[in-house]
Image (tube, grey):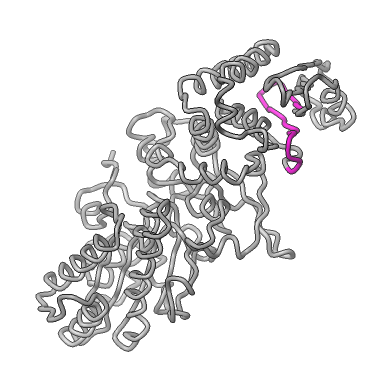
Amino acid sequence: MKNLPIGIQTFRDIIEGGFYYVDKTHFIPKLTSKYYFLSRPRRFGKSLFLDTLKEAFSGSKDLFKGLYLYENWDWGKRYPVININFTSGVMMSSELLKKNIHHILETNARRYEIDLEEKEIINIKFEELITKLHQKHNMPVVVLVDEYDKPILDAIENIEIAKENREILKDFYSVLKGMDPYLKLVFLTGVSRFSKVSIFSGLNQLQDITLNEEFSTICGYTQSELESVFYDRIKDFDKEKVKEWYNGYSWLGEKVYNPFDILLLFSEKRFRAFWFETGTPTFLIKMFMKNKYYVPELENLEVGEEILSNLDVDNIFPENLLFQAGYLTIKEFMEEYGTYILSYPNLEVRKSFNSSFLIYVFKEPVRVSKTETSIKKAILTKDIDKLKDAIYTFFASIPHDWYRKNDIDSYEGFYASVVYALFNGAGLNLKVEDSTNVGRIDLSILSEDAVYILEFKVVEDKEEYKALKQIKEKRYYEKHKDKKVYLIGIEFSKEKKNIVNFEWESLIEN
């Protein structure tokens, strides 16, 4: 077996070190234009692809033996490459960002033994570096920018600093427009897709390949790549379980796995939320609570092109961040309407995101985890009364003062959001039948041999006995002919802040 390249983002180190490598070099000859932009979530292989580009344009032919590019590239041409990398450090001030950019430019200059006369003004220094590289090598310059947006995202909770960093980057990137005659390729990557107006002023020719089907698998592992490159490791795992946990990311093409998850899975030989645990969506959940977001809508979230395309610190939408950060992915594109249906990509994200929502809201991870475990056990053992006890105990343990401090009474979809998040956090297979009516949720839980259909209603103060009746009227159970079906009606009181009615019935298998 080869070694697993965990945390290695340098193409040369992977090849010379004998690590596994999924060949993405066939994408390089497709870059026939000059200016490109690609958005992908963190730890998706963006840095490795940029480093592969660097070695290709630098003429490092020997590194590509056995790969697609070896026989499909003009190795007689070598181009000077400028690497601009914002992946390291946290830039929480404009001064720190400026110092970082100066350091990056000077490091590139030293690598090519160039002396830069400009010491103060970033724009002029960048122009000087490009022109001197072009003059010295008599070849156009390649500019690779990794995590172009990180200085903005680092300060996203401090809008003023985020705006200052945005303006610095806007001026910095604007240099590329005037340097067009000296450039061979400009390739920028990042997590977010900030609008061209706000950050790429004048760079109108920038081609965004984020949702270009031809480049949809440029980062991440496809199913065939997983099974061919890692054939000697995947044989020890249930492929369907691996797919359920980690596959499902889509950018209008074939679904892919996050490489970080797969490498850690093969290393630790157990299923865990490897990728999710490297960063928590705290800022997003804060926005959810502030905007009183109805969490079940994330199952089938319909958005337009403008929501997916542009993000700016002046006008941030949760939908933008959810998609661009990788917590939601494209489930369906309805071309006739120009809209997208977003949903969770896989079990890892579904389970972890909902648990994080509950932990952020209630500040008690142990209680959340204990309740999720109790719910899963109740479902697996078909003990509906224990399911009721788990939900009732969870809400009963919330101090009354907590509701006063959080003004939950005005958050109409809160109780349904919490119940939905508890089931998802338990890792159950859910299907939301109707996730648009705030304050109630029609939910199906699917197990191997049973289906649980739930209707959740919020009442003013006392039971109305309508939830179970409504399930029967909708006749959702008729879809399930080969499993035992449980119908569960739950009514939750705004006044008592807990369950006031819990009715259930089981239907005989057909």
Is residue 451 in view? no
Q: Is residue 296 left or right of residue 111?
A: right
Image coordinates of residue 190 in percent, x first then y, are: 40, 60
Q: What is the quadrant of the N terminus in the image? A: top left
Name above or below for residue 466 compared with residue 431.
Answer: above
User: Hey, which quadrant is residue 442 in on the image?
Assistant: top right
Q: Residue at x 70, y 13 (%)?
A: 384
Magenta span:
436-455
Which residue is nearer to you in this view: 508 or 387? 387
Image coordinates of residue 236 in percent, x first then y, are: 41, 30
Name above or below for residue 205 compared with residue 357.
Answer: below
User: Hey, which quadrant is residue 497 in on the image?
Assistant: top right
User: Hey, which quadrant is residue 335 in on the image?
Assistant: bottom right
Image coordinates of residue 503 in percent, x first then y, are: 79, 16
Which residue is nearer to you in this view: 421 or 154? 154
Name above or below for residue 296 compared with residue 174.
Answer: above
Image coordinates of residue 200 in percent, x first then y, are: 43, 74
Q: What is the quadrant of the C terminus in the image? A: top right
Q: Residue at x 64, y 19 (%)?
A: 391
Q: Is residue 324 left or right of residue 388?
A: left
Name above or below for residue 198 compared with residue 350.
Answer: below
Say whether residue 187 is magenta.
no
Magenta stretch, main secondary structure class: strand
Which residue is nearer to you in this view: 506 or 117? 117
Is residue 175 in view? yes
Q: Is residue 508 left or right of residue 14?
A: right
